[in-house]
Amino acid sequence: MTQKKIFYLTIVFWLLIFSGFIAYKEYTLMTGTEVILKTEPVDPRDLFRGDYVTLNYEISALDLEEIQAADPYFEYNDRIYLALELEDGYGVPKKVYRTSPDNELYIKGTVKEVIYDWETDEDGITTEGPYSKELRVKYGIESYFVPEGRGIEIESQQWAGRAGVDVKVVVDKYGNAVIKSLLVEGKEIEI
Amino acid sequence: MFDKDLIRKWLDEGTINHTQADKMQTDLVEYKQEHRSKKQIIAFSTIGAILIGIGAILFVASNWERIGNNIKVFLLIGSTVGIHYTGYRLKYETQKYPRLGSALVLLSAFLFGASFFLIAQIYNVNANNSTLVLIWIIGVFPLVYGYRSASIAGLCSLLFYLWIGLLYMERTDLSELVTIWDLCLISGIAVYFTGTLHGLAERVKYAEKSFKFIGLQAVLLALFIRTFELGGYEVEKIIPVIYAISGILFLAVLLRKPLRTGLGSFQADMSISILALLMAGVTLTTIYIPGSEKTYMIFFNIIFLGLLTLLLYAGYSTEDLGIINTTMFWFVLLIFARYFDFFWKLLPRSLFFMLGGLVLLVISVLLERKRREFKARFSGGEQ
């Protein structure tokens, strides 16, 4: 192979990676449904990408005694599909599935921690093996990048109780989610 | 290349006359000057490329709000392609500045990563995501062979460790399987082995040293950390198997005569294979007869010192100044660490620092003398 061919192949390969990644995210943004999720941010720093706000959503912790689940046995790194119901634009968890549900709005996540419980009889003796009581889930939308130094500002607004920070995300039909904007006191903010 | 001693020997033997000897001396000096200046050009251009690359990554990290996202993406991708093209032209088409061309190709590999991270930032892809680093590796690894680039081989090796580290942080179940230092050691052996494999084929030999250098640093770092009291050492059953497989693979390559003769750094490679097999034994024993914290500390000090001795021998016998410098660096670090461990609590602080300073001065004089001796031997009198 000549050096010229290698050069062209490299450029095509790189542009394919860039455009493929952009197309994947843009597809979600253009075809998905907007959902607002309640959150509480904290501010760390990424290795390559500077300041960001870590978003801990209400749906990041799923109490399976309150939310219906297809089965109660989950393990670390399991893929889950959380069906959402829209209430005034806010996404409220409806049911946790093992496989993608039909005709429902759902968001795809990965179980990162499982809190177990055991079935006991009247005397407190364990009668059945452990089942999942609570799940900690990651949806791939836990970081929101802000200009250098601004993360602390947003964090202090939240912790001072002056403002409620919500996140507007777009969820496509495959359950992939992309963050669209940050809402402070219900208003979209430009950072 | 011949040296001054050899010329003198030929002159004494009558193989060459005085005119020929003078001509050879002059050519030798010129060759060495040329060689040195080539090395300086490579060093300066590579460091320049690395600094600009780091600058581009920090530019992405600052998330500068005055420029819109689209313009930032356009700027970075445009620079990546533009610099890659300039590097390609200088190296292959005009061939006027091949070394600068290589440095620009390396810079474009950095900019590829910076551009990709910028796009990920715009779409708020989760922070410290290992997959992004993996895509960076996939994007630039073919350049190692396409452009015969040793520096990109080094970049890929470093990114590999970064990817391993981030993956280890992401997947908490990995910590139940392997400790971070065992993972560092295993991946160091793997990267070093990749270097050995590259050394076997003439077409890809240029990448051998980069892989081996980075792999060796990871191996030595992991062992060095283990020389401290780190608490209990827990090992899963799969770990000795991995060490044993890597050691056996190494031996399978090294013990075949036609392959062995092609390797310039056989002794150093052999030291790493011995280490892999030794670690298989240590981890296997740990599963059935776990030792105390102190036992492991003493044991790993012995292994680390043993490996350094083997490497020093390897560097000396293959006349590889790189291995000797690496070994001496880690040797000084080990002495420094043990000095702090043993004397920090025992001696009054002032005495501690004075004695420490004195020990280091003596060591530095001894090492410098030894290094000069080696260098003089390898370069035929030049210091």
Image (spheres, coloured by chain):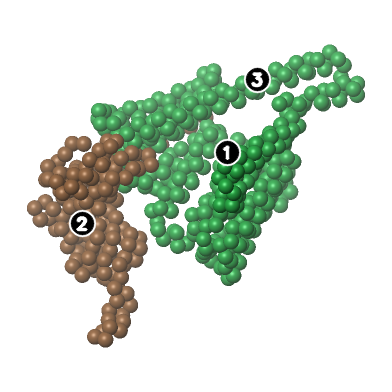
Q: Confirm whether circles 1 and 3 share one chain.
A: yes
Residues at marks 2 and 1, CA–CA distance in whole angstroms? 47 Å
**Circle 1 residues within 10 Å: few <14, some 14–19, many ≥20:** many
Chain letter, colour green in render: B
Return the chain for callout 2: A
Q: Residue at x 91, y 24 (%)?
A: B13
- State the residue lying farthest toward the bottom: A123
**Circle 2 residues within 10 Å: few <14, some 14–19, many ≥20:** some
Q: Residue at x 46, y 50 (%)?
A: B164
Position in image of residue B63 (x %, y %): 30, 34
Report the side of A93 relative to B293 (left or right).
Answer: left
Q: Which residue is mark 3?
A: B34
* Residue type pointed to by label 3: Glu
* Residue type pointed to by label 2: Glu
Kindly state the secondary structure of the residue where label 3 is placed: helix
Return the chain for callout 3: B
Position in image of residue B8 (x %, y %): 84, 22
Q: Is residue A71 placed above or below A77 in the rendered structure?
A: below
Taking depth in this image into account, of A84 and A4 the one nearest to the observer is A84
Chain letter, colour brown in render: A
